[in-house]
Amino acid sequence: MGKILNAIAALTMIAAAGTAQAGETLNRVMEKKAMVVATNSGWPPQSFLDDNNEMVGFDIDVSRELAKRLGVEVSFETPDWATLTGGHWQGRYDLGVGSVTPTKARAQVIDFAGIYYYSPYVYVVHKDSKAKGVEDLKGKVIGVETATTSEDFVRRQLEIDAPGLPPIEYKLEPGEIRTFADSMLPFDDLRLGDGVRVDAVIAPEQTAQNAIKNGYPLRILEGGYAFREPLVVIAEKGDPEWTAKIGSLIADMKKDGTLASLTTKWYGKDYSAD
C-alpha cells in the first residue's frame, strides 16, 4: 500500500508541475516588480519597432498601463504567433497583449483575462481594382496572415468564444487562399498591383488604414465589415488569481476611459465599446 500511495503522490506532483499554481504569476511579478509581456514586433499600429528600434503601438501602451497600475516595470518578448497563442509558456511570459481573438480552440490552451477592445475586419483591394463589393471577389486570390482569424474566416472555420456576438456570415467565395507569415506581407503583395499576386486582403480595419496612411495604393471595400471581433489579453492557464487581477484592471481601464483614449490615439476611433 505504501508503494501505491507513493506512486500516486509522485504522479500528483508531476501533474501539478505542468500547471501554474493559483497566484504564482501574481506573486512572481510583484516580487520582481517586473512583468514580461509577449506581443508582436511587426503589426502597426498595434505593436511595432519605431525608428529608434523601440517598441511602440496600441498594445504596447496598454501593456505599459497595466504595468503602471500593478506598480511594476514591463519588458517585451516577441515570439511567433503560434507560440504567443499556444500557451505552455513555462514562465517565459507573464501576459500576452497581442490583439488576440478569443476562439474556442485557444480557450483550451490559454486563459482570457478580459476583452480590451473590438476590431472590425475589412476587405482591402488595390486602388485600381474594379471590385465594388464582396461579391466581386468571388473566385479571386485572397491574402491573409496565417494562423489568424482572417485565415479562419476565409476558410469558414471561425469560432469566436465570446457571449453576445452575432453569428458569423460567410459571403466570400475565394478561388485561392494565400497565407503570409506577417500582417503586412499581404499588403506588400497587394500594393504591386490589382491581381498581380493577390486580388484582395482580409485584415483588421486599423491595419488596413495604417497601410493606406503610409502610402500603400489601396482602398477598403464599402458595404460593411467582413466580421467584428473582440480582442483579449491572454494569460497562462491554471492561475485564476492572476487572470482575475488583470481582468479587473482591464475593467477599470474601460470604465475610466483609458481604453477609449488609447484606441482613439492609435486608430482615430473609439474601439473600446462593445
Image: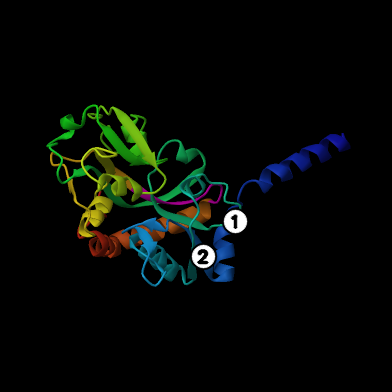
- Mark 2 falls on what kind of element? strand
Discs 1, 2 touching: Cβ within 8 Å: no
Q: Amino acid at mark 2?
A: Met
Front residue (pair 158, 179): 179
- Mark 1 falls on what kind of element? loop
Using the numbered discs, state the Cα–Cα distance from disc 1 to disc 2 in whole angstroms.
11 Å
Residue 47 shows which numbered tag? none
Q: Amino acid at mark 1?
A: Gly
Q: How many marks?
A: 2
Q: Position of residue 131 (x, y in %)?
A: 14, 36
Which residue does the image show at 28% across and 52% down from the upper left?
Answer: 207
Q: Position of residue 261 (x, y in %)?
A: 25, 64
Lateral position of residue 268 relative to residue 189, left or right: left
Lateral position of residue 65 relative to residue 227, left or right: right
Front residue (pair 230, 47): 47
Q: Is residue 232 magenta?
A: yes
Q: Give the mark, 1 or 2, whose residue is nearer the N terminus.
A: 2
Q: Is residue 254 above or below residue 147?
A: below
Q: Is residue 3 magenta?
A: no
Q: Is residue 180 visible?
A: yes
- The quarter of the image holding the N terminus is top right
Circle 2 Cα neighbour tier, 10 Å, few/some/many (<14 / 14–19 / ≥20): many
Which residue does the image show at 81% across and 38% down from the upper left?
Answer: 7
Residue 121, by quadrant, is: top left
Residue 35 shows which numbered tag? 2
Q: Position of residue 37 (x, y in %)?
A: 48, 60
Dominant SS type (magenta) = strand
| Highlighted magenta segment, given as a residue range | 231-239
Q: Is residue 98 above or below residue 171?
A: below
Lateral position of residue 233 relative to residue 126, left or right: right
Residue hosting label 1: 91
